[in-house]
Amino acid sequence: MSEENLPIINLKNKVIWVFGGAGYLGQSIVLLLSKAGAKVLCIDLDNRAETFVRSVELGEGVIPVNFDVRNSVEINPCISEQITRHGAPEGMVNLTYATTSKKLEEITAEEFNEVNHGGLTSTFLLTREVGMEMARLGRGSIVLFSSMYASTSPYPDVYEGLKNKNPIEYGVGKAGITQMTRYLAVHWGKQNVRCNCVSPGPFPNPAVQRDQPEFVERLSRKSPMGRIGQAKEVAGTVAFLLSEASSYITGQNIRVDGGWTCW
């Protein structure tokens, strides 16, 4: 197939790093990027990346990397090492987050600060380092992950009977990611580095779907589409934002929420 006849969402031979790549949404993203021809670094903590990559047998095109983004002092050395080994990334995706899962009345100042470090500060340090390298080379696409809870409050009735609704520090941190996206898009715009973010709606992981069917049903009823999202429905948006099909899109928050934030 000639180059001009390749599909519009084509990631052939692009080096893309996916932080949080072994998580529920991350796995689907890694799989799709690999199928689209990208060389993918699947980066996660506690050897999760290696376990996932071995289980799906994607071959040499997907490389597992063990790293915890909360370890700030190791961010720059880790990035330098991966660039030396695999080349500078043309795309970066960050799905990492942090939360206490505690009630508003219970969370301490120390816990709030720790979560902000894991979800917001580490994202800034990581994205800054990768983005500076992209800017030096004059190309790149960054996709950060926010949430529907960056722009709306958890609907209490949906969480009826559960220990806690979506915790405050999660939404606060994700709102920061949305603003960070806008700032970085402007900061690196003239260096041809794009930065966008994706805000998923209700995407409960398989364990929640299995163990809390009544909660999932309430989520589904609250969604205008009448159902929860499937992981592959986020992956397509990420692939689009990493591809040349979105070459004039930057600084945007793409809501993949089944219309949840329309209410």
Image: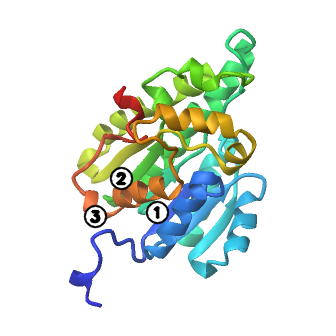
**Residue 181 visible somewhere in the drawing:** yes
| Residue located beneath label 3 in the image | 244
**Number of residue marks:** 3
Tell me the kind of residue under disc 1: Pro
Disc 2 vs disc 3: Cβ atoms closer than 8 Å?
no
- Residue identified by numbered label 1: 89
Give neighbour class at mark 2: few <14, some 14-19, many 20+ (Cα, 10 Å): some
Of the numbered discs in the image, which one, if any, rests on residue 139?
A: none
| Front label number (3 vs 1) | 3
Q: Dot 1, crowdedness within 10 Å: few (<14), some or many (≥20)?
A: many
Q: Quadrant of the C terminus?
A: top left
Relative to residue 97, is residue 66 drawn left or right? right
Q: Residues within 10 Å of mark 3 (few under 14, many from 20)?
A: some
Q: Specify the label residue 135 is tagged with.
A: 2
What residue is shown at x 52% (from left), y 53% (from top)?
Answer: 230
Residue at disc 3, secondary structure? helix
Q: Quadrant of residue 261?
A: top left
Q: Are circles 3 and 1 on residues that touch, CB within 8 Å?
A: no
Instruction: Single out the residue that lies furthest toward the top.
Output: 105
What secondary structure is found at the residue carrying circle 2? helix
Q: Quadrant of residue 189?
A: top left
Q: Is residue 187 above or below residue 239?
A: above
Residue 20 visible from this viewpoint: no
Using the numbered discs, state the Cα–Cα distance from disc 3 to disc 1 in whole angstroms. Answer: 15 Å
The three-letter code of the residue at mark 2 reads Ala
Q: Position of residue 190 (x, y in %)?
A: 23, 48
Q: Identify residue type, mark 3.
A: Glu
Q: Position of residue 22 (x, y in %)?
A: 66, 57
Percent of width and height locating residue 259: 37, 37
- Looking at the picture, does residue 61 appear above or below residue 255? below
Nearer to us of marks 2 and 3 is: 3
